Image (cartoon, grey):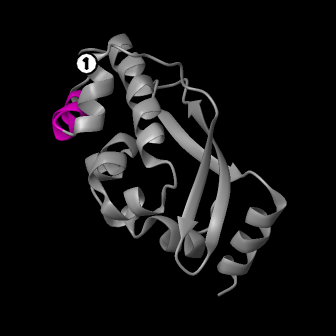
């Protein structure tokens, strides 16, 4: 997992944000820093939208998911994917980020479901030795 120092470098200070602003779908479409570091942002955003649609279709009464939907529904990439009725199961996603002062970082993202409440958390683990090494170096700064 990404440590505190490296997390700030890669994603900015999102832990100080509200639950809505920390939501991955919200951040993907509304955080300029996140858009800037994601090498293939458009494809990632489209795939995440399809996963979000699948999740939302299973819990259509969720006020939290409706709040996320309302905050991103006007983004052209979100709207295009949503309107095409694309759905994907939550699963592994490969990410390549280009981070200032860190270079290219390769991650494998997966989602874990909490059985007691049905919430999901996204976990990003280093996808190669080079990324693992750079994250270690960032953590000791």
Q: Residues within 10 Å of mark 1 (few under 14, many from 20)?
A: few
The residue under the point 61% across, 27% down is 91
- What type of secondary structure mainly makes up the magenta span? helix
Q: Is residue 24 magenta?
A: no
Question: Is residue 71 within the magenta segment?
Answer: yes
As helix, strand or loop, the secondary structure at mark 1 comes to helix
Residue at 29%, 33% in the rendered image = 78
The percent coordinates of residue 82 (x first, y second) are 29, 22
Q: Which residues are magenta?
A: 66-74
| Quarter of the rendering occupied by the C terminus | bottom right
Residue 13 in which image quadrant? bottom left
Q: Is residue 72 left or right of residue 98?
A: left
Left or right of 30, for residue 137: right
Question: Compared to 114, does 29 lie above or below?
Answer: below
* Residue 115 locus on image (x, y percent): 55, 23
Coordinates of residue 73 in the picture (x, y in percent): 19, 33
Q: Which quarter of the rendered picture does the N terminus lie within?
A: bottom right
- Which residue is depicted at the point 37% across and 65% down? 33
Which residue is the extreme one toward the bottom?
141
């Amino acid at each position: 997992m990404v440590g505190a120092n490296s997390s700030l470098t890669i994603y900015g200070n999102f832990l100080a944000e509200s639950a809505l602003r920390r939501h991955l779908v919200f951040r993907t479409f509304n955080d300029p820093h996140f858009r800037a570091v994601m090498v293939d942002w458009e494809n990632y955003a489209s795939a995440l939208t399809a996963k979000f649609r699948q999740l939302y279709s299973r819990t259509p009464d969720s006020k939290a998911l409706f709040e996320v939907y309302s905050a991103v529904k006007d983004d052209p990439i979100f709207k295009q994917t949503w309107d095409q009725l694309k759905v994907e199961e939550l699963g592994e996603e490969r990410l390549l980020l280009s981070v200032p002062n860190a270079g290219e970082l390769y991650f494998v993202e997966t989602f874990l479901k909490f059985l007691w409440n049905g919430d999901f958390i996204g976990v990003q683990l280093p996808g190669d030795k080079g990324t693992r090494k750079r994250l270690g170096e960032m953590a000791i700064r």
